[in-house]
Image: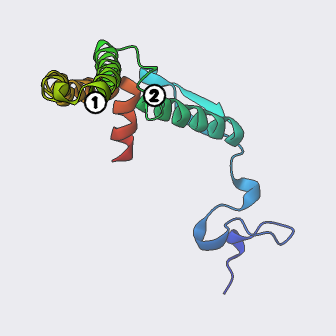
């Protein structure tokens, strides 16, 4: 049984499948609230998709997943890189000395071991700093809250 109220002249249905408005009755713009003022802003679907893309790109950039340790300007990162370079230089010098005089290996191993023991603490300090820095950003907080 067809209700005459559900149809408009010309035979087109006012309601689409399962009660959704027909394509002609759907708005071509989206509305969203503009902050704490409570005002609404109309934007096209293309503008909404563009805004979403920019917010998503900003979120991933703020996560700093692709920030190389050498490019990081934090003091913890610089200390870790400096320690790694110092160890590499010490290993080269040790290898050269041991190649000439093998009896010097024990003393060289002790000094190298002391420098190697600093690495775990520097790595822990760096990643603790990085987690605090990343999760302290408002963009990241909003992204994780909206994820839930």
Residue 104: x %, y % from top left: 18, 24
- Residue in the image at 29% along x and 15% along y: 79
Residue 136: x %, y % from top left: 30, 23
Task: Tell me the crowding category of disc 2: few under 14, some 14 to 19, or many 20 or more residues within 10 angstroms, Cα based.
Answer: few
On screen, residue 10 above or below 40: below
Q: Which mark is residue 26?
A: none
State the image quarter where residue 16 is shown: bottom right
Question: Element at badge 1?
Answer: helix
Q: Residue furthest bottom?
A: 1
Residue 88: x %, y % from top left: 34, 24
Task: Tell me the crowding category of disc 1: few under 14, some 14 to 19, or many 20 or more residues within 10 angstroms, Cα based.
Answer: few
The residue singled out by tag 1 in the image is 131
- Residue 127 visible in the picture: yes
The residue singled out by tag 2 in the image is 68
State the image quarter where residue 20 is shown: bottom right
Q: How is the image coloured?
A: rainbow
Q: In which quadrant is the N terminus drawn?
A: bottom right
120, 33: nearer the viewer? 120
């Amino acid at each position: 049984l067809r209700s005459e109220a559900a149809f408009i002249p010309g035979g087109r249905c006012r309601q689409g499948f399962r009660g959704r408005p027909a394509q002609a009755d759907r708005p071509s713009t989206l509305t969203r609230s503009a902050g704490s003022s409570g005002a609404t802003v109309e934007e096209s679907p293309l503008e909404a998709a563009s805004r979403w893309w920019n917010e998503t790109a900003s979120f991933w950039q703020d996560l700093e997943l692709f920030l190389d340790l050498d490019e990081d300007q934090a003091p913890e990162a610089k200390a870790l890189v400096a320690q790694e370079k110092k160890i590499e230089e010490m290993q080269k010098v040790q290898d050269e000395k041991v190649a000439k005089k093998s009896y010097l290996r024990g003393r060289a191993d002790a000094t190298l071991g002391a420098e190697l023991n600093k690495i775990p603490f520097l790595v822990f300090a760096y990643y603790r700093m990085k987690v605090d820095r990343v999760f302290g950003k408002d963009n990241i907080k909003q992204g994780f809250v909206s994820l839930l």
